[in-house]
Image (cartoon, rainbow, N blue to C red):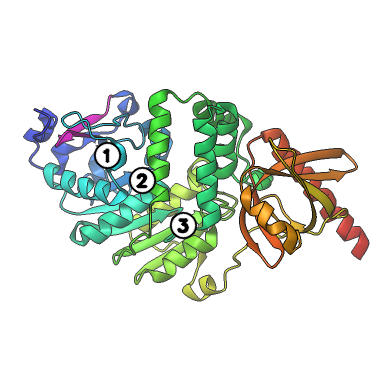
């Protein structure tokens, strides 16, 4: 029966961590995941290490929503100096395809992030892991923080990357927009939107995310199966329901990409400031996915911290003190004034045209002056209006997500559901910067 705990035979026979962990070799990631069933829910994992560090405290990696174990193939090799590694996928996360309980039929969407953390703690009890070091990335950072709150006795130290305590309205609107696109089956637009939200397109010149990696990322999203779409819906809604992330009391490293535009550096810093025993570092020239763009630097940072060594001299890392975090700039990208501020917003379906003035903008969003008379109309269509822009290259438009209106002005995010429009906007912004520099010269 799946309602009772079931594990691999070799786990039953294991009396030490040496028995629980497989010795890593080049074929390890070709092996199927091991499984544990807990009350009808499936936990998938790999447990691997090198003999010389197998005695060290294990490192449990809780990834984001869609990384599979193979995504970490070239990452974990740099961690083995610190100790053996457990990669774990809880129901509907990572590559774990389970979206309903095999005993009750209950949707995995009923499992909140706190429930998943509780399941992880239970699993550790089952397999006999009494003390761990934890790495939580993106969505996994929330599960990791909840685990540290629920079971502090299990955690030796923790790394959180891409974390925030409370979700901002504009961030929730981005997630909601991606869900709208998926439910409308605009999958090509959905795939591009997810990448443009996670990857800082405005900094590709310094993050150097390869076109091949971006294309493969897009292909994965655009070709989601029905199960993958349901898992995306489940994980997005878990985040949208999230009221707050508990602050870990253990030793904690909070890390983020220098140009993370999804979980902003100042949000990561604010989380770190609340941790009583924390260190903070940014990975230089990376965004929300440093493990793809600056893998060597990111993993060196993590391995150094996990070994209890100083991170101050790790190459490619920007460590920051508590005092520096208190004065961190909130806005990642400067806003610029445009040469032709008078323009219009139009509705994507209805014959609605609203005259507006662009106060300033950047690649991510815009501040518009509408006047008090138009505010009510704009508030009716927070995700259906497009801003029209024009420069010497010609005219184009980009859809907006209006998240705040006050005193005749509206703040909006640009939707970014098209690589071509994103590139066009970048060229537009650059021209405005150049025109401003000439004017001030």
For mark 2, what is the residue? Answer: 79
In primary-sequence order, the first of circles 1 and 3 is 1
CA–CA distance in space, label 1 to label 2: 9 Å
**Residue at 34% from the left image edge and 37% from the top image edge:** 93
- Report whether 341 appears left or right of 52: right
85 or 272, which lies in front? 272
Can the viewer see residue 183 in this picture? yes
Q: Position of residue 425 (x, y in %)?
A: 75, 43
In primary-sequence order, the first of circles 1 and 2 is 1
CA–CA distance in space, label 1 to label 3: 36 Å
| Residue 34 inside the magenta-drawn segment | yes
10 Å neighbourhood of mark 2: few (<14), some, or many (≥20)?
many
Q: Position of residue 392 (x, y in %)?
A: 91, 42
Magenta residues: mostly which secondary structure? strand
10 Å neighbourhood of mark 3: few (<14), some, or many (≥20)?
some
CB within 8 Å, label 1 to label 2: no
**What secondary structure is found at the residue carrying circle 3?**
loop
368 or 324, which lies in front? 368
Please determine whether, in this image, residue 155 is positioned above or below residue 119.
Answer: below
**What secondary structure is found at the residue carrying circle 1?**
strand
For mark 3, what is the residue? Answer: 167
Tally of numbered tags: 3
Magenta residues, start to end = 32-44
**Residue at 72% from the left image edge and 37% from the top image edge:** 421
CA–CA distance in space, label 3 to label 2: 31 Å
């Amino acid at each position: 029966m799946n309602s009772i705990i079931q594990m691999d035979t070799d786990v039953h026979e294991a009396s030490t961590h040496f028995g629980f962990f497989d010795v890593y070799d080049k074929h390890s990631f070709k092996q199927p995941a091991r499984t544990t069933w807990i009350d009808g829910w499936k936990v998938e994992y790999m447990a691997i290490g090198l003999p010389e560090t197998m005695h060290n405290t294990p490192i449990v990696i809780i990834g984001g929503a869609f990384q599979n174990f193979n995504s970490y193939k070239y990452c974990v090799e740099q961690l083995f100096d610190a100790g053996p590694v457990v990669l774990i996928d809880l129901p509907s996360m990572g590559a774990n395809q389970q979206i309903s309980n095999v005993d009750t039929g209950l949707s995995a969407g009923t499992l909140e992030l706190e429930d998943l953390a509780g399941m992880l703690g239970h699993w550790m009890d089952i397999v006999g892991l009494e003390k761990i070091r934890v790495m939580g990335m993106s969505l996994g950072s929330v599960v990791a923080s909840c685990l540290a709150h629920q079971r502090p006795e299990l955690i030796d130290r923790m790394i959180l990357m891409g974390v925030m305590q409370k979700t901002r309205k504009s961030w929730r609107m981005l997630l909601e927009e991606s869900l709208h696109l998926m439910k409308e089956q605009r999958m090509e637009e959905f795939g591009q939107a997810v990448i443009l939200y996670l990857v800082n397109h405005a900094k590709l010149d310094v993050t150097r995310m390869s076109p091949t990696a971006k294309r493969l990322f897009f292909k994965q999203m655009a070709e989601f199966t029905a199960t993958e779409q349901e898992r995306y819906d489940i994980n997005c809604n878990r985040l949208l329901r999230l009221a707050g992330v508990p602050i870990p009391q253990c030793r904690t490293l909070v890390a983020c990409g220098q140009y993370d535009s999804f979980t902003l550096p100042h949000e990561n810093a604010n989380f770190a400031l609340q941790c009583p025993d924390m260190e903070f570092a940014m990975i230089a020239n990376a965004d929300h996915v440093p493990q793809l763009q600056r893998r060597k630097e990111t993993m060196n940072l993590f391995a150094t911290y996990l070994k209890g060594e100083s991170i101050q001299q790790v190459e490619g890392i920007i460590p920051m003190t508590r005092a520096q975090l208190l004065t961190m700039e909130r806005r990642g990208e400067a806003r610029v004034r445009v040469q032709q501020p008078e323009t219009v917003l139009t509705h994507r379906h209805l014959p609605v045209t609203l005259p507006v003035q662009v106060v300033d903008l950047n690649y991510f969003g815009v501040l518009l002056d509408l006047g008090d008379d138009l505010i009510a109309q704009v508030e009716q269509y927070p995700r259906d209006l497009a801003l029209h822009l024009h420069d010497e290259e010609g005219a184009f438009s980009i859809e907006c997500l209006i998240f705040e209106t006050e005193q005749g002005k509206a703040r909006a995010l640009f939707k970014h559901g098209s690589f071509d429009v994103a590139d066009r906007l970048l060229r537009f912004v650059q021209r405005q910067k150049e025109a401003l520099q000439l004017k001030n010269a």
